Image (cartoon, rainbow, N blue to C red):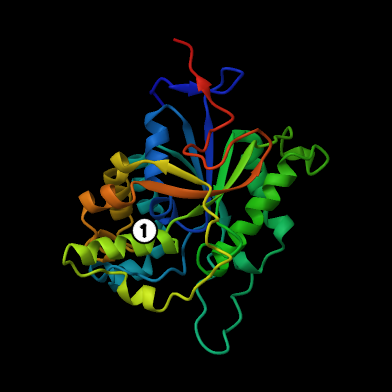
């Protein structure tokens, strides 16, 4: 971390941001432009990755080969390392085993010992250690639905909320380090209905084929989710960094796929932010926000 911080906290310490994600690639598909913006501003950013993504499907046809499948765990680690360097972040593995995405009716049981089958408090222990050691000002994770209903994403939400609470309790596993109260906890909303509809309508208005048309036809109204976004972080100038980090996850991201079918100028015109919901705060703020560090950051001394 060589960038001089533009802002610090009220004690003069560099700002610190912790993202908690379920699998390698999630850090690049959810909030990566926000990450790149804050890194450029001198914020320390760490990603805690819950699982190794061992049971993830190979979603890029060019990588769907026997040699890749046989070494998928190591390859996904290498991809994560490449994305980490592109984003300029620190990254830690929490060491859990990918649960996979069950399919069928009825759904089959999850593999024994996989991440989503574990006790929440026990599974939060390594994350509490990370929180107490890194002492973030802000933690981001997924909402209670996991962003989408993958069991590991739902479990990621559960242990993140548990760790947020436990890390602040000096009587909870004191051997993990001094208690730390993280000032703010956010849920990330990568692709919510308003954003998807806006991009779809803009594509249609330009006479282009929208990659979201079918998804929107199957997207039922969900009033409970509407209006949950509280914080829109302007980060359009870092969309290119986000895309390079995504492409680093070659087993998961097809460079010819839907991720890259929206022209960059259209993205910047229609939706140049990444969006979050403020779930917990110990500092005063005013909603809506345009900064995860509202109520925490002050200008760095000249």
Q: Is residue 53 left or right of residue 94?
A: left
Which picture quadrant has residue 73? bottom left
Q: Residues within 10 Å of mark 1 (few under 14, many from 20)?
A: some
Which residue in the rendered view is the most extreme toward the right? 171
Task: Please say whether residue 256 is visible from this viewpoint.
Answer: no
Task: Please say whether residue 203 is visible from this viewpoint.
Answer: yes
Q: Quadrant of the C terminus?
A: top left
Which picture quadrant has residue 58? bottom left
Front in this rendered view, residue 91 or 203 = 203
Report the residue at 72% width, 63% height from top: 119
Report the residue at 30% width, 46% height from top: 239
Report the residue at 65% width, 58% height from top: 158
Report the residue at 78% width, 38% height from top: 174
Front in this rendered view, residue 61 or 302 = 302
The residue that label 1 is drawn on is 75
Vertical comparison of 85 with 53: above or below = above
Looking at the picture, how far across and down is residue 288, in whole percent? 52, 42
Q: Quadrant of the N terminus?
A: top left
Q: Is residue 152 left or right of residue 90?
A: right
Exactly how many numbered labels are in the figure? 1
Looking at the picture, how far across and down is residue 280, in whole percent? 65, 45
Which residue in the rendered view is the most extreme toward the top? 302
Looking at the picture, how far across and down is residue 8, in whole percent? 52, 22
Q: Is residue 284 left or right of residue 45?
A: right
Front in this rendered view, residue 58 or 202 = 202
């Amino acid at each position: 971390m060589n960038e001089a911080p533009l802002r610090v906290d009220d004690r003069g310490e560099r700002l610190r941001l912790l993202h908690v994600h379920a699998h390698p690639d999630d850090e690049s598909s959810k909030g990566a432009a926000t990450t790149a913006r804050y890194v450029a501003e001198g914020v320390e950013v760490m990603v805690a990755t819950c699982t190794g993504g061992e049971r993830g499907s190979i979603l890029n046809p060019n990588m769907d080969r026997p040699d890749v499948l046989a070494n998928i765990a190591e390859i996904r680690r290498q991809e994560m390392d490449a994305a980490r360097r592109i984003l300029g972040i620190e990254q830690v593995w929490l060491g859990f085993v990918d649960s996979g995405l069950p399919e069928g009716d009825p759904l089959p049981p999850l593999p024994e010992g996989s991440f989503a089958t574990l006790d929440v408090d026990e599974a939060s222990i390594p994350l509490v250690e990370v929180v107490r050691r890194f002492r973030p000002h802000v933690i981001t994770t997924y909402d209670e639905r996991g962003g989408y209903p993958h069991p590991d994403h739902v479990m990621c939400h559960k242990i993140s909320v548990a760790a947020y609470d436990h890390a602040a309790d000096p009587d909870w596993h004191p051997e993990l380090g001094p208690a730390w109260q993280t000032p703010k906890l956010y849920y990330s909303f990568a692709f919510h209905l308003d954003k998807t509809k806006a991009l779809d309508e803009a594509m249609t208005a330009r006479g282009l084929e929208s990659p979201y048309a079918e998804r929107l036809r199957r997207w039922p109204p969900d009033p409970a989710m509407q209006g949950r976004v509280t914080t829109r972080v302007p980060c359009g100038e870092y969309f290119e960094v986000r895309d390079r980090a995504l492409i680093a996850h070659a087993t998961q991201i097809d460079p010819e796929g839907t991720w890259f079918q929206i022209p960059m100028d259209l993205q910047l015109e229609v939706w140049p932010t990444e969006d979050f919901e403020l779930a917990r705060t110990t500092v005063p703020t005013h909603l809506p926000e345009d900064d995860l560090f509202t109520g925490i950051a002050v200008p760095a001394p000249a």
